[in-house]
Amino acid sequence: MSTPKTQTEWKLAELAEAAGVSPRTVRYYVQRGLLPAPPFKGPDTVYGEEHLLRLKAIRVLQARFLPLDAIQVELQRLSTEELRKLAGSDPTPTPPTYDAPTARVLVNVPPPQPMPGVVPRPTVMARYQRWELAPGLELHVSEGADAKVRALAEKVRALIEEFQEREQS
């Protein structure tokens, strides 16, 4: 009875599937320096075990909410054995946990009294105008902002609209 041979080389699509990412993501990570470039180019390009380990490690570190720049630094400092251990750990996102705030009940506390000679001012809520400049990017401008600030906000909005028009054409 022979033992099954473990795979040590993958084509791009096979590697992406084994790591749970898209081929485009693999190419992007190579471009960003998160993965080393494969040794061959063209249709015979193959990726090795280090590529798979790094991809799995990247997924684990992303689940820990690290940005790609921090992931790149972390991958550079890890030894091969540390990389293997990290790649084998659970990539399930673990959201941060917070202790529940403790509630304090104050009994028989009189309401605060104004200081003598001080006239309390009514509380005024500031109102803001919200502009969605792009998906995920908002600009908030106070309705009480002076003319210079409002003009600056208009310029920012115009620049982003101009950029988006150039991107679409």
Image (spheres, grey):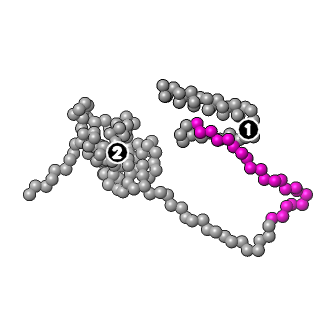
Residue 151 percent coordinates (x, y): 69, 31
Q: Residue at x 78, y 53 (%)?
A: 123
Find residue 62 and report its horizontal and vertical position in percent. 42, 49
Residue 79 at least partly seen: no
Query: Where, by quadrant of the figure, is residue 35 drawn?
Result: top left
Label at residue 118: none
Q: Which residue is at 75% across, 40% downward? A: 144
Residue 88, can we see it?
A: yes
Left or right: 39 in relation to 90: left
Q: Which region shows up in magenta? A: 112-133
Label 1 Cα crowd, 10 Å radius (few <14 / some 14-19 / many 20+): few
Instruction: From this view, report whether residue 113 is shown above or below residue 37.
Output: below
First-in-chain label (2 vs 1): 2
Between 69 and 7, the residue placed more toward the observer is: 7
* Farthest-out residue, right: 117
Q: In the image, which disc is placed on residue 21?
A: 2
